[in-house]
Amino acid sequence: MKNVVMRAGIARLRSTRVQLTVFACSLLAASCTQRAEQLPTLAGTPGNGTVKTTTAATTAPTCCWVAVTNQANSKIEVYDPADASWTTPKWSWMPTTALSYNATSEIPLWEAPTDIKVRNNTVFTGTAQVITATSYRLATIARYTGTGTRGQKLWVMGFNDTTRLHAMEILPDGNCIVASAGAAWPQGWIRIYSSSQPAPNHGVNTQYFFTSAHAVLWDDTHQVLWALGNELRKYGYNTARSGGTITNPKLDLLASYTVLPSAWGHDLSADVNNPDQLLLSTNGGTYVFHISTGAFSDLPGAAQQTMVKGISSQPGQNTLVETVPSNACPLYPANTWCTSVVNFYDATTGAATGSRTVGGAAIYKGKTFDPNYY
């Protein structure tokens, strides 16, 4: 999005172990099997490198729920693709005083939610998984599983009304990256925070100018951070050259892919079924980025859409998840950024395999709710 300016008046994820039926045959037009949602185990596999010094919870890839950012009610909502009707979410969340958010300085900044991720993370006391969420003016980390209340505030940072936050990512060591598109071109930045640290040191940060920054993604396989805006960038984290530490984290620009297949990046996800691939969307289309070669290729068939705000894949499934702006966005029908529909596609052929509708919703982004780093 070339910093599409949304209207200023926009209104404002571990359940108990359940059996998931992978998409109904009517949705995927494929054979259906029963799978259980896997909750994390606390015995992670330590790796090498700067980030993997903290053992994180791990879980085997399984078919996952889908999380949407519903700007009609200012909530994060999580749904099961196996449910034919998306009328009642499996879980929903927004900042509240009951979850320790400040009624004066934090909750009023939560408007127009723009991003949601769930991640395996045991850095914060009593946690096994956390969520990260952004709205235009608020970025936060909250408990998802572990000891304590689900959705409880763990870290939060507020911003002014020109920031236009679009995404964030938490690193396995508890620090996080926030992406701002800015209110006008050529504004934008990504900022890395020492969110792993106790207050008041959890606000230490370093900012990197990045025009129209819209997405950030930690790549555990390659131990790098990917960021998407007017270009695709690869960063090292706390490398010797960057001079960063866990208390004062820094990024190190390793590569810039300045020529996207089409202009203005929107979303970026791991291809969870292929560690050499990223999925990304721009104003002009949806693409695969091949990490080993640095080349882009088009997604096939109907999965090739323009202005896609959310793109992801389902672990162990040959399925892509996309949210495409449409007239099926009752709250803001004149806009080009929202929808009430989540679409599913065959990842090989690009054929449309079905959709789910959240009645009355203004969904900016809908993505696989997968706790694993890839």
Image: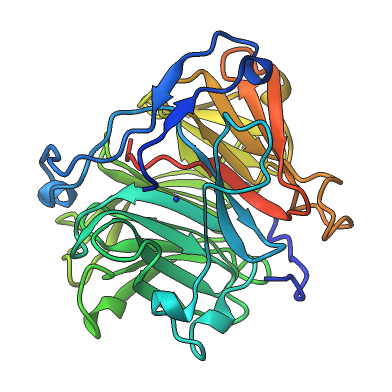
The residue sitting at the top extreme is: 31
Vertical comparison of 19 with 184: above or below: above
> Looking at the rendering, which quadrant does residue 249 occupy?
bottom left
**Nearest the eye: 320 or 147:** 147
Question: Could you say where residue 174 lies in the image, as x and y percent from the top left?
Answer: 25, 61
- Residue 273 in view: no
For this view, does 306 lie left or right of residue 39?
A: right
Residue farthest toward the bottom in the current orientation of the protein? 104
Residue found at x 34% / y 49%: 119
Colour treatment of the image: rainbow
Rendered view: 188 above or below 295: below
Vertical side of 174 occupied by 81: above or below: above
**Quadrant where the C terminus is found in the figure:** top left
Q: How many marks?
A: 0
Horizontal relation, residue 199 to residue 133: left or right: left
Residue drawn at the location 61% of the way across and 32% of the way down: 83
Closest to the observer, 349 or 331: 331
Seen at 22% across and 60% down, the residue is 242
Q: Is residue 102 above or below residue 185?
A: below
Compared across the picture, whether 345 is left or right of 137 comes to: right
Q: Residue 273: percent from the left, percent from the top?
A: 41, 23
Q: Position of residue 371 (x, y in %)?
A: 36, 43
Q: Quadrant of residue 25?
A: top right
Residue 134 percent across, percent down from the top left: 51, 64
Q: In this image, 331 relative to 257: left or right?
A: right
Tell me if I can see residue 221 in this picture: yes
